[in-house]
Amino acid sequence: NMDMLLGVMGDPIAQSKSPVMHTAALKALGIPGAYVPLHISSSQLGEAVQAIRTLGFRGVNVTIPHKVAVMEYLDKLDESALTGGAVNTIVNDNGVLTGYNTDGIGYVRSLKAEAVPELSGTRILVLGAGGAARGIVSALLKENPASIVIANRSADKAQELAAAWQVTGKVTGTAMDGAAGIIPEADIVINTTSVGMFPYPDELPIDPGLLHGRLVVSDLIYNPLRTRLLEEGLRAGCTIHGGLGMFIYQGAYAFEYWTGQAAPTEIMRRTIIECFGG
Ligand code: NDP
């Protein structure tokens, strides 16, 4: 039996916490193998995907900026990749490459475990309409929320994204300004923009004066672990939920596809927190 070869393709890639997290998971379960960072530029992406087969990698994660572009090089796309519109996990079954999106289900699992056990009937405001928002909206819809409003700096992108779920009658798009009218009636606000991420931790995606105590405020960002938006949420009496759990669970689902074994999520979490000097 061969060692299990795994990795993550991105550009840049040096900052990724996936190698240390998955290496710890492999070690904890005694699985011989390695998970390595792979610095791949956009012009090399096709060759790099071919190399998964050539080199006998069991699988890879795919991160910025390749999550959409990689789809055309794969043999099969799981339903999660089709509805999420992006791939963050590739599984190699004897040369047949299948793309999955574990970001959306990873996020929802984290939100339910840490902040909102029951999402049915909730009114959700999603800030941002990029790649992460798309996967998250598709996973949230499976939980039967009452409504999802997508607010984005570029309103046309929010409307485009909402139109993709027009059949559900539950998703609408608006400009970021529209958030002000939605928040008073919302149960959950989810920041999927990159506003507030390292190295600009002082930025806020919305006016914090809008936050109220009945809200759950959730942020996908996990660097810093507690964003300024979450700090403002705490101050306003909100329940807060950060992006670390999403990162752990998207990795856990990928790990389970590759190894067929339950991922050691507590060890993965501890490893990341140690990385941040926690
Ligand atoms: P994209 O580049 O696809 O989307 C970025 C989004 O942020 C867009 O909606 C964009 O709006 C908005 N945005 C960027 N800058 C500004 C600004 N100055 N003001 C207002 N809006 C802005 O990125 P992703 O969707 O891939 O990632 C978004 C965030 O989610 C990142 O912080 C990333 O780290 C985090 N993430 C976390 C994960 C986890 O595991 N916890 C997994 C994946 C992502 P516009 O359309 O107008 O440009």
Image: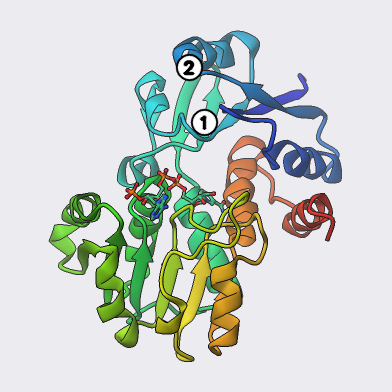
Residue neighbourhood size for the residue with mark 1, other residues' Cα within 10 Å, grouped as few (<14), some (14–19), many (≥20): many
Image coordinates of residue 227 in percent, x first then y, are 60, 65
Image coordinates of residue 147 in percent, x first then y, are 26, 74
- Left or right of 62: which side holds 172? left
Q: Secondary structure at mark 1?
A: strand
The quarter of the picture where the C terminus appears is bottom right
Task: Name the one closer to the observer, 32 or 41.
Answer: 41
Q: Secondary structure at mark 2?
A: helix
Image coordinates of residue 156 in percent, x first then y, are 19, 51
Q: Residue at x 32, y 40 (%)?
A: 82
Q: Is residue 248 above or below residue 50?
A: below
The amino acid type of the residue labelled 1 equals Ile
Q: Is residue 87 above or below residue 178?
A: above
Alpha carbon separation for disc pair 1 and 2: 13 Å
Q: Residue at x 20, y 69 (%)?
A: 170
Q: Residue at x 36, y 57 (%)?
A: 128
Task: Name the one closer to the observer, 182 or 123.
Answer: 182
Residue 142 visible? The answer is no
Distance from mark 2 CB to nearest ligand 1 atom below 8 Å:
no
Q: Which residue is mark 2?
A: 45
Mark 1 and mark 2 lie on one chain; the one further toward the N terminus is 2
Residue neighbourhood size for the residue with mark 2, other residues' Cα within 10 Å, grouped as few (<14), some (14–19), many (≥20): some
- Left or right of 179: which side holds 275? right
The amino acid type of the residue labelled 2 equals Leu
Image coordinates of residue 7 in percent, x first then y, are 66, 28
Residue 194 visible? The answer is yes
The image quadrant of residue 76 is: top left
Q: Residue at x 67, y 62 (%)?
A: 225
Q: Which residue is mark 1?
A: 90
Task: Name the one closer to the observer, 188 or 232.
Answer: 232
Q: Is residue 31 above or below residue 184?
A: above
In the rendered structure, find residue 201 and report the number of the disc placed on it. none
